[in-house]
Amino acid sequence: MLVAAAVCPCPPLLVPEVAAGAAPELDAARAACLDAVGVLAASRPDLLVVVGPADGRSAGSYPAGAHGSFRGFGVGLDVTLGPVGRAAPGPALPDSLAVGAWLLDRARWAGAPGAQVEGLAVDERRPAAACARAGEELAARVGRVALLVMGDGSACRTLKAPGYLDERAEPFDARATRALGSADLDALDALDETLAYDLKAAGRAPWQLLGGAARGAGLGGRLLYEDAPYGVGYTVATWS
């Protein structure tokens, strides 16, 4: 059963070394993310799964010890999913999970004694119903499951945003933020997957997986942060 969740944005710019001179601009977002990870630690899960968006080629499961890197952004920084130890063989973490792994390391994640840590990259185009079913299956795996859900809102909030300005972006982000901040499962289910894709809202699929995982868990939500720096919607929330 799902006992806690943290929702965080996943831009590599969240990592100060990647952001470089612009790092202070996301200090409030980083602080909120670390507070959210603290809620996960307090829930004492048997299993922590870091969930994030990916393209179809890198979607799938990643074990503890999977490695990630920010070298593609010109920074010699590598991360490992879960407690530091021997790196697991296999493909590198997609960017969203690498940022999640960095957050866990930054928070000095120790989790519960014997707790497993895994990663799950969700195809951004995965249909809403399939995301919800995957969440239900994930929550049923062990007695106490926690999710670190990585994902951004629309990337079309300003003229300089990655997806340029789209007047539909701000209302979409407002609906998503309300749903995430209040743990409104029906509102999450209702997010339009086609509109989300048009607005480059990569968090839609992970958020709807969270909605499926939370069915029957009776969790409440709390909004910690909401803003749109660089024209991209970022939301931090906790469910517990």
Image: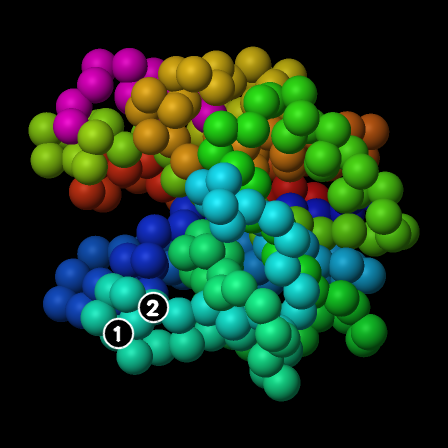
Which residue corresponds to mark 2? 70
**Around disc 1, counting alpha carbons within 10 Å, would you say few (fewer than 14), some (14 to 19), or many (20 or more)?**
few
Q: Looking at the image, which is closer to me, 35 or 67?
A: 67
Say if mark 2 contacts mark 1, CB within 8 Å. Answer: yes
Q: Locate residue 162, reporting x and y percent.
A: 19, 37
- In this picture, residue 196 sits left or right of residue 220: left
- In this picture, residue 56 sits left or right of residue 227: right
- In this picture, residue 81 sits left or right of residue 167: right
Q: Locate residue 153, reporting x and y percent.
A: 38, 33
Q: Is residue 159 above or below residue 97?
A: above
Residue furthest right as drawn: 143
Q: Quadrant of the N terminus?
A: top right
Q: Which residues are magenta?
A: 164-176
For residue 82, which quarter of the picture?
bottom right
Q: Looking at the image, which is closer to me, 173 or 39?
A: 173
**Which amino acid type is marked by label 1?**
Val
Mark 2: secondary structure: loop
The residue lying at 22 percent from left, 70 percent from top is 74
Q: Main secondary structure of the magenta part?
A: helix
Q: Quadrant of the C terminus?
A: top right
The residue lying at 27 percent from left, 37 percent from top is 232
The residue lying at 38 percent from left, 31 percent from top is 201
The residue lying at 49 percent from left, 46 percent from top is 57
Numbered label attached to residue 138 = none
Mark 1: secondary structure: loop
**Around disc 2, counting alpha carbons within 10 Å, would you say few (fewer than 14), some (14 to 19), or many (20 or more)?**
some
Q: Locate residue 181, reporting x and y percent.
A: 53, 33
Which residue corresponds to mark 1? 75
Q: CA distance from mark 2 to mark 1?
A: 6 Å
**Which amino acid type is marked by label 2?**
Phe
Question: Does residue 168 belong to the magenta stretch?
Answer: yes
For residue 66, which quarter of the picture?
bottom right
